[in-house]
Amino acid sequence: MATPRRWLEMAVLLLPLCSAGPSGGPGFLLPLRQPRGCGPAQYFDIGSLSCGQCGASQRKSRRDTSCDCQPGFKIISNNGGSITCEKCPKNMSGITQDGWDCIACPYELTAEGKCKCPLNEILVERDTNGALLKTALCVQCDGMEPSFAALNPLSNRCIRCEPTFISVNKSCTCSEPNILVSATKKACKRNIGGLCFKSTGNFPPKGIATVRFGKLLYSNLTSCQALGNMCVMNMNSLSSGNADACGLFQFVYANTAGLGTVHSISFWRQNLPWLYYGDQPGLASQVLDTTQFPTSFTFKGTNKLCPDTLTRLNAAYTFGTTYQQKCKISVSKILKDYSNPLFYDVFLEYYDEEDKQQYLWAVPVLNLNLQYNEIFINKGNNMNNWLLTRRMFLVDTLSGRENDLGNQPRVIRIASEITISIRLVPNTQRGAIYPPLIIIAYSDVLVQNPNTESVLVSFSVDYEMNQSEARIQTDTVLKFLLFYAGDLANVFFVITVGTGIYWLIFFKAQQFVSVLLPLPSQEDNFVSYLGCAFTLKALQFLHLLLSQLTIDIFFIDWERPRGKVLKAVEGENGIRSIAAPVSIWRTYFIANEWNEIQTIRKINPLFQVLAVLFFLEVVGFSNLAIMDSSSSLTRSPESYIAPSSRILRYGVSAALWLVIAIIQITYFSVFYERFVEDKIRQFVDLCCMSNISVFLLSHKCFGYYIHGRSVHGHSDTNMEEMNMNLKREAENLCSQRGLLPNTDGQTFQISISSKMRQHYDRIHETLTRKHGPVRLLNSSATTFEQSTKAYHTMNKFLGSFIDHVHKEMDYIVRDKLLLERILGMEFMEPMDKSIFYNDEGHSFSDVLFYGNEATLLIFDILFFTIVDISTQSFVLAAVLTYLQQEIFRFIRNSFGQKNLASKTLVDERFLI
């Protein structure tokens, strides 16, 4: 259990290549220090993984993990972390083997300043009662009968030699021609240990026996590390009623708070190993979900349990490769290769390009066998119930030994399942991962016949991400179908209109009979296509209407107080000076203007219906739908009137609707908007004069922005100053109105980041009311104050966002690419920064009827023709079409007004 920990080259490591380091989360990182990197007068502190300074008259030990006194100096104190040395007198220049006393040596000294005896002699520094001798003695062991004594492996005692020596040579020497088989060259040279065989007998080959020697450092640090290892072998299990190794460790941990922490990590106490992330469950999410690492890293390490070819083993360490390996290991091999447990503290190693330093990040371990109050808390999927640990081992063949450590263990414990879990951080532009997690499960194996028994072990590397981001959600599929329905309706509309006009022209205009109209039974397929077109277009129109009634909108008021006013203070006898309030009437004015333009169209619906009805019934275009060859618009009452063709009726009415609508749109765009009034552009100008911007979100992360910040600083002013401002702007005596300096761009399409949207939603939750907007008279004062506070918070947040105050939620301004304009989509995903696209076409009108004239027009045409074909009455079709236009306009106005009041906190009574 006191086996020294193997360092980074023996554990599974993750090595990022030239990264900017982790972002966010608690600081579980520390500078990378290795024993070989410590200076000559420094030692490597295994408790803190850092270099410590050796004191005066001291030097680094051979193991580099502690300090020793220089030759000629003895130890006078050792508190477990540091030592104090004192120079020996000249007549006692040697140092005892334990380093604590000075002694005179009979022969020469070693490089460490200790006494050295000739070969085959032991060094005696104390008498039988332990008293220190003034001069050390070198005593030769009696290797002859009856003593048969020889040096022990440490050369400090005489013990009975190996029986093979006695039986072969009748002494403790193995002289030729007999053969000595020893574990080390030193032992063979000094005739220490090993086995002696006759040259003619059978003996095992050289090297089959191995002897390892280690030195246990008895200090507080070593004891605490050993206690931690025992706790790890006990599965890090904690229980309030048990006083086992883990319970003792927790007791020591709780009572050593005064020792301080290592590398400012609260879970890592001085001289104690870091075993747990906290003393109770609940911190796993803070460890695993708050820090990000780049994905440009590779693995370094090997799977020590399952042997395989180098190519297959290296496949596990290629990022993104899901790796799985299973193998069976014989129990006899486990007992041979893992006689002592090895403990691992796993770290992630990365290089920080900013400060050009290497760092380590502690990789947490999820031990599925850990019990907390006798409950396996790590076996569930709820991360909040986990208790993460640090130290791990692969095989434990020590705990199952009974009575004697030399006996074969009855039970061995092996890491049967090891998984390195790597999770991808969602919504990152360059790709990042959360800290890796090692998931380990141990199995206990009963040892009966090691040669025939085997153990199944597995090692895997898994990569996962939050599939809620990638999973196609129901609303996404529904929206796709609705958009697809609109496009398919357009296809059906074009085909049916083309078919109707084709029969109208080629049947009515033919001089020689070449085509005949379809029979009524043959028209059924045409009517079916027409019905599909209307149904699909109706779905698109209703989806458009619902989307416009639920948009997010907010008016950003840039006006700031001008001066201060005196105000009486309630509950106090006196007045105080406060900032002058900013008038809300400009916001109400802009809200009313927005409310007015919600249902404006590029055509006059009433004129459209009357004009179509006029040409059909008065001018006589309806006669073109009769199933005869005449193309005359008038018919005498005495003549025979043939039945009407449904295809011709559709062709005539659809053609009239399209022609009149195109004339109206052309007049509206070319003449009316240019010379009379353009309400869309006038609204943008009005926002600028009112010092109010409009922030619109038609989708979750897409919308529009109208920059209405006044170039004059203030708009809440009198008529004289307003006229003066307009004059200065006309004479170019002030800056331009654009969002960017020296530009005129005021309208933008915006694609905001998810972080920006989440912050917007958090504020908006307090702004939205369950039963609509706040009423000034019948609402409680507390509710009104909370809503007002939320309004000012949203106004301040959006204003600071536009002013680039929030660097973590910043934005950039760019033009759309030509292909982006053609396809009507954006190629860049707003990961870290939002994107503002310059929009000279004022496409924010897409959230109004104005920007969807094509959809409304096709819906009106299809509604009119469906009613006409069903009733064979153009008049009834015209009346019902106008009624549905007015009904939907009323719905759009009423519910749009309520949504505007709810989202902007403008009281609905001020919307007229």
Image (spheres, helix red, strand yellow):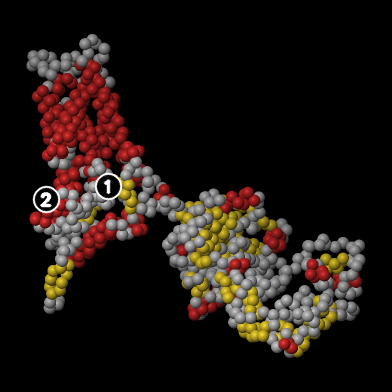
Q: Is residue 82 above or below residue 743?
A: below
Q: What is the distance, in whole Å, between disc 2 and disc 1 at their CAs?
A: 28 Å
Residue placed most toward the observer, 585 or 417: 585
Residue 109 visible? The answer is: yes
Query: What is the crowding at mark 1: few (fewer than 14 residues within 10 Å), some, or many (at least 20)?
Result: many
SS of the residue under disc 1: strand
Name the residue tied to disc 2. Answer: 912
Name the residue at 8% across, 15% down: 636
Q: Which amino acid type corresponds to the residue marked 2 in the rendered image?
A: Ile
The percent coordinates of residue 511 (x first, y second) are 21, 11
SS of the residue under disc 2: loop
Q: Are marks 2 and 1 in contact (CB under 8 Å)?
A: no
Query: What is the crowding at mark 2: few (fewer than 14 residues within 10 Å), some, or many (at least 20)?
Result: few
Name the N-terminal-most of marks 2 and 1.
1
The furthest residue to the top: 512
Q: Which amino acid type corresponds to the residue marked 1 in the rendered image?
A: Phe
Name the residue at 23% across, 22% down: 501
Left or right of 633 on screen, residue 760: right
Left or right of 807 on screen, residue 578: left
Residue placed most toward the observer, 246 or 226: 226
Q: Nearer the viewer, mark 2 or mark 1?
A: 1
- Where, by quadrant of the figure, is residue 891 drawn? top left
The percent coordinates of residue 823 (x first, y second) are 33, 38
- Where, by quadrant of the figure, is residue 722 drawn? bottom left
The percent coordinates of residue 461 (x first, y second) are 55, 54
- Where, by quadrant of the figure, is residue 494 drawn? top left
Left or right of 67 on screen, residue 204: right
Quarter holding the N terminus is bottom right
Q: Is residue 757 above or below residue 512?
A: below
**So how many labels did they put on this image?**
2
Name the residue tied to disc 1. Answer: 748
Residue placed most toward the observer, 348 or 284: 348
